[in-house]
Structure formats: structure tokens, C-alpha cells
Amino acid sequence: MSRRARREPRRLTRWWRRRSLRTRLTVIAATAIAVSVFVSFQVASELLDRELQDTAENQLRADARVLATNAERAGLAKIQLSPYTGSGRLVRVVLPDGSTRTPAGQPALPPVSEHAGRVARGASADLMESHDSDDDGYRIYTLRAGDGAVQVAGVTDDSPINQFGFGMLLIGLLCVVGGALVGRTVARTGLAPIDRLTAAAVRVAHTRSLDADIPDEGGGEIRRLIQAINDMLAALRDSRQAQRLLAEDAAHELKTPLTSLRLNIELLVRLDRRGTLDTALSAESRTRLLNDLGTQVAELSTLAAELTDLARGDVSDESTELLDLADVVVAAATQARSRVPDIEVALDVTSVWVSGRPAALQRAVLNLVDNAGKWSPTDQPVHVRLRAEDASAVLEVDDAGPGIDATDVPRVFDRFYRADSARALPGSGLGLSIVQRVVDAHGGRATVGRSARGGALLRVELPAATPPAPIARRTAGEDTAAR
């Protein structure tokens, strides 16, 4: 196939794809009707031609039998042949010697064929044959009669077929035009909801307003499409509302530490400009002030990092992988000890495999440990337990603090929510909300309860996964050896 021949289908495909849906439906409807009319014409023409041919041949046989009967009575050489009147059937008598007799004034027929001669000689009883010429076509029936044969012929007439074909052509054109109009009308009516849907989507894009729902109309696929778009608009409204609340809450939470930081810095700058920094503040006051500044900067850094992590939602470049949650818990506990050396973490973990994002899970465990560390007394460790329970990996973190009031339990995982008793403690109020988001993203569940030591018990359940085959075999071998 040449390169030009290969380009033609591609051009046709590109042209078809650029057409509107209405045009496509109109072309498809018109083409389907045209093909149907063409196939119907071919079938009807074939049936009509066969029926006309059978009728003509039956008439020739009937006329030949009458002529043969008369010839046998009078003799082939003496039978009277009526003069040709200018229309109707043509006859011919074939004598035993091969000569022929025809009516006066009758047009000449094609010569007697070899097969017809065999009928005259008695080799066969009859023969139906066709002869086509430049002028006329004949259908000739030869019947054995006496010592010879008689022939009855009819002119092949294609005019009924031609007239039928012309009529079918006109009907086909009308059907194609009507089909195109019907297809256009059906397309316009059927796509009217799509037009309204498009107009509504354009209006939303231009006005940036997500409040107006698209009217639910139609049925089937159109209705499901409208419902899906309405659900999408509702999700976008919720997302926009969540973003606005996040911005408002962040602005509120940032106001206090920024104000305190600004006042302390302004105090230092004012005293430095007066040259009384060394005399106005004692060494102990300066140290306390600088420590406050460092604490405030650390809180702002933590708050900014948590806001960034929370604002990203479920969007993360980290891929999901099969991992041992015990390794994640141990790494988070080690990180918590390095960040706050005063925190004592007691681990009781077993190997449980899950499918998840390692960094996100480690951040969630770290936030749980940090939260417990704020409340647990210095002489009481934070207990971290990990075990497999049914088809879940269960992580529990508890402390020996005062616990969580019943009124605060429903809002523990809300963003920026801090109980009245926790407002004096460091933190942004985002740690547990990040835990909730990570757990939800992994298809798990986070709950709050009271520990046996009287403090808070935070419990996380994640769907467990089947460990890799080599590890599963090694674990089974270790269990067998232990028995």
C-alpha cells in the first residue's frame, strides 16, 4: 500500500472526528437508510426478475404444448401457422431433416442450436434456453413433437425491472432525505439536555459560581451524567468551603504567635536603638526572652509545615507500597525520642504488613506519640502497642495523663481544635487532624478512648495485607521452630 493510500483513511478519520455529534447522527441515519434501501432493492429486484422469468417460461411451455398437439395431428409439414401480427409469441417448427418453418412476417429467430437439434432428433424431450444479441434477447422453449420439434420464443423484456428500479431509486432518495431529517431531529431532541448541560458548565466556568445545580431531567445515561456533574459541583463546593475554613483557621492560629513574636522583636530593637539593651534587661530576662523567641519560631515552623501537609490533602508524590508497620512505628518512636529527649516510649510491637505510604504513616504515628508525650507525666512512659487483630493492623498509643473529657472526644480530630486544658501547651491543633486524614486515606479508622492508666487511648485500625512470599515462608518456619 502506497503512502498516499495510507494517508487517505487517516484524513477521513480526522474529518469524521471533527464533525459534531448531530452531524454524525444525521450521516449515520442517512447511511443506514440508504444501505437498507439498496439491499431491499437488490433483493426485490432478484425476486421480481425470478418471478417474471418463471411466469414467462411457464407461458412458453403452455403455448408449446398446444402447438405440439396441433402439429402431431396435422403433421409438422402441413400444420397451419398463423401470420405474425407484430406482437406476441414467436413460433418455429423444426422438421426431421433439420429445416424450419415460421409464420409469414415473423422476425427471424436465432439459428437452431445444437441442443435444440438434439431435441428434434429425439435425444431429449424439451429444452429451455436463452439467446442474447445486440438487438433483442430471446427465451426459446423447444418441445419434441412427432418426428421433429416445435419452438416457442418470447422477447426478453427488462422494462418491468428497469421501471421497478427507477421507482425504487426515487423511493430510496426520498427515504435518505427523510432519514437525514429524522436523524437531525432526533439528534437535536436527544442532545437538548447535553446542550443545556454544556451551557450550565460554561456558565459555571465563567461565573466561578458552584452554587447552582443543573436541573435533573431526562433519563438513562443523560440523567446519570447530570447527577455525576452535580455531585462533582457539590464536591468542589465542599472543597472550596474547606479551603476557606482552612485559610481562616490558619490566619487565626498564626495571629497569636506572630503578634507575640513581633512584640518581643520590637522590644529588642527599641532597647538596642536606645543603647539600653544591656541595662534594661538582665541576663536572665534576655535569656528567657530569646528562649521565647526560639520557641515561637519553632511553633511557627511546625505550624507552617503542618498547614502545608494538611492543605495538600490526599495529593502526594509518595507511592503506595507493601511495608511492615512495625518498622514504621519503631522509626517514629526513635524520631520522637530525638526531638523530645524527655519522652520515654515503651514499645510492644509485632510484625504486621500493610499497604500504604511509609512517610505519611510515620508522620501519623509520630503525631500520636507527640500528642501522648505532651500529657504523659515525665516519670510515666508513652505506651505504643502494635498487633494483628482479625484482618486489621491495630496500633494503640496511650499515656498516663488526665485523659480527654467526654465533651472534647467528638472534636479531637478536628483541625485547630484544642481543649481548654491544652491551650497552654505547645502545639498547633493540627497533629491529630493529620492522623485522621492519613488513616482515612489508607482505608482505616481512628478512635479515642481511655487507657487503663487513666489517660487517653488513641487507637488506629488499618487493613492488613499479606506479607511477601519469602517473608511469609520465613515467618512460618520461625513459628514451627518455636513450637
Image (tube, rainbow, N blue to C red):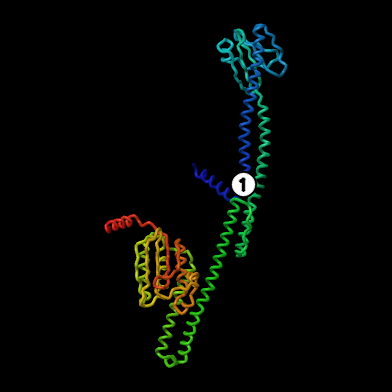
User: What's the residue at 54%, 65% (across, down)?
Assistant: 239
Which residue is at the front of the view, 251 or 40? 251
Percent position of residue 74, x then y? 67, 6
Q: Is residue 251 left or right of residue 182?
A: left
- In the picture, which quadrant includes the C terminus? bottom left
Reply above or below: 473 against 268.
Answer: above
Q: Give coordinates of residue 243: x percent, y percent.
A: 53, 68
The residue at the far right in this view is 85
> At x 67% / y 38%, what residue is drawn?
173
Q: Which residue is mark 1?
A: 25
Say whether residue 365 is left or right of residue 193: left
Q: Secondary structure at mark 1?
A: helix
Nearest to the observer: residue 258 or residue 184: 258
Circle 1 packing at 10 Å, graded few (<14), some (14-19), many (20+), is some
Q: How many labels were placed on the picture?
A: 1
- Measuring from the top left, give residue 215's x and y in whole percent: 63, 57
Q: Can residue 77 be seen in this snapshot?
A: no
From the viewer's perspective, is residue 34 above or below residue 401? above
Tell me which corner region of the image, top left, top right, bottom left or bottom right, holds residue 319. bottom left
Quarter location, residue 368 = bottom left
Q: Amino acid at mark 1?
A: Leu
Q: Is residue 254 above or below residue 152?
A: below
> Image point 60% across, 7% down: which residue?
147
Q: Nearer the viewer, residue 320 or 265?
A: 320
**In the image, 261: left or right of 91?**
left
Q: Is residue 383 visible?
A: yes
Q: Which of the pair 340/293 is nearer the observer?
A: 340
- The residue at the point 52 percent across, 73 percent down is 249
Q: Is residue 79 above or below residue 191?
A: above
Where in the figure is residue 158, as x and y percent of width and height? 66, 26
